[in-house]
Amino acid sequence: MNHQTSFPKDKINILLLGGIHPSAETYFRDQGFSLIDSRRGEMTEEELCEAIPSVHILGIRSGTEVTARVMEHARKLLTVGCFCIGTNQVDLKAARKKGVPVFNAPFANTRSVAELVIAEAVMLMRGIPARNAAAHLGTWQKTAAGSFEARGKTIGIVGYGHIGTQVGILAEALGMRVLFHDIESKLTLGNAEPVKSLDALLKAADVVTLHVPGGSSTKHLIGQKELAAMKKGACLINASRGQVVDIAALDRAIRSGHIAGAALDVHPEEPVSSKLPFHSPLQGLTNVILTPHIAGSTAEAQERIGRDVAEKLLLFCDTGATAGAVNFLPVSLPSHAGRHRILHIHENRPGVLAAVNDVFAKASVNIASQFLETDADIGYVVTDVDEKKGTGLKAELDRIPGTIRTRVLY
């Protein structure tokens, strides 16, 4: 995809932090951008405050925090791209107040996560983690005791979204019965069967895998009561959010023998850097797989994320489209060839749209098309005008009370 860029490419500063996949930089360069500072390391808040004033496009991963203080220093920043799934590292409200949409790649690593979940399900049902640990210590545990095929077993998927559905498809290919529970009605894929209650799913499944969002509504979704409801000898997999499982309760359930094994890729407390130590009550349990939040970390997923987020960033810069932004009004827009496009982000208060159109009317500017989206806090109006009459309006639009940001795309 080639963009008709509405600003001089040789004056746009792009800062990429945290070792973002080269596919992102390649995409930017293919589109004609040259001022790209790509770094493997992260930046502290202080370092980012120093760097951000001259940055137009910022790309980060989970290790860089974009705080309200950083946003205060962002004089030229147009947009932020989180080259990952989560966006907790960005103060989304502060970015929104500055008129800076934040994009991520929520689905680019779906397949990678699903594959690891299925692999862990097979490993846990075969008792491989404990046998592997024993072999490393010189013990030869050649026995079929506690080792089961995946075929014919039941996998219970909690959260039937993009990842949950992929897990179901792969599990069914292995001959597993697929049950799922979700708080929303979902389209069933393959032969998966919806279950009305979490309790019913837990009682029926040989393997339970969690794919729900974080937050207060899912904190300790799986606790002592839920673990007790699971089949004796069942296994638990969590590749969603660390707070979803009560780790102390899981520890007790595993040590008692009620839960045969577990695999956790996410943890309640995770080191902010690979240089810091990791601690978990489950360390030392040979029937538990602990991985460092890498379910989506494959070469293929990172390449897709790099390209996906880079495309969203440039699409916004070139057209004003905000579809896919996590903190902004979702607006999909056509191209604006032969027109000036004027973007006006403002506080949602009465009279702003009328004031915007009054500016056009006084300048005798004909409006070719106009798009408006509002929510409780902000409004976003996109206006296409005749090419020869779109210049010189920015200053007038900036003076409208409640204006957050005005951009003119030529």
Image (cartoon, rainbow, N blue to C red):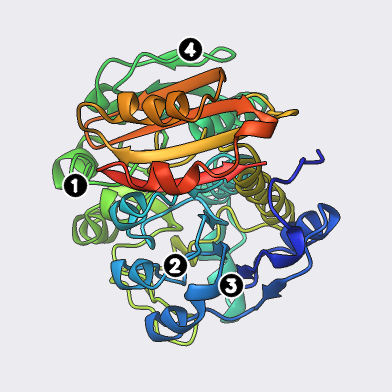
The answer for how far apart the CA atoms under marks 4 and 3 are is: 38 Å
> Which residue is labeled 1 in the image?
223
Residue depicted at x 57% and y 51%: 123
Front-lying residue, 33 or 232: 33
**Which is nearer the N-term, disc 3 or disc 2?**
3
Q: Residues within 10 Å of mark 4 (few under 14, many from 20)?
A: few
Front-lying residue, 228 or 399: 399
Q: Quadrant of residue 194?
A: top left
The answer for how far apart the CA atoms under marks 4 and 2 are is: 45 Å
Residue depicted at x 33% and y 26%: 353
Extreme residue toward the left, this view: 225
Residue type at mark 1 is Gly
Disc on res. 187: 4
**Which is nearer the N-term, disc 2 or disc 1?**
2
Determine whether the residue tagged by mark 2 lies in a helix, strand or loop: loop
- Residue 68 vertical position relative to residue 330 in the rendered view, above or below: below
**Which is nearer the N-term, disc 4 or disc 2?**
2
Residue depicted at x 29% and y 63%: 268
- Marks 4 and 3: which is nearer the front? 3
Q: Residues within 10 Å of mark 1 (few under 14, many from 20)?
A: some
The answer for how far apart the CA atoms under marks 1 and 4 are is: 28 Å
> Which residue is labeled 2 in the image?
75
Instruction: Tell me: 56 left or right of 95.
Output: right
Is the Cβ of the residue at disc 4 closer than 8 Å to that at disc 3? Answer: no
The answer for how far apart the CA atoms under marks 1 and 3 are is: 37 Å
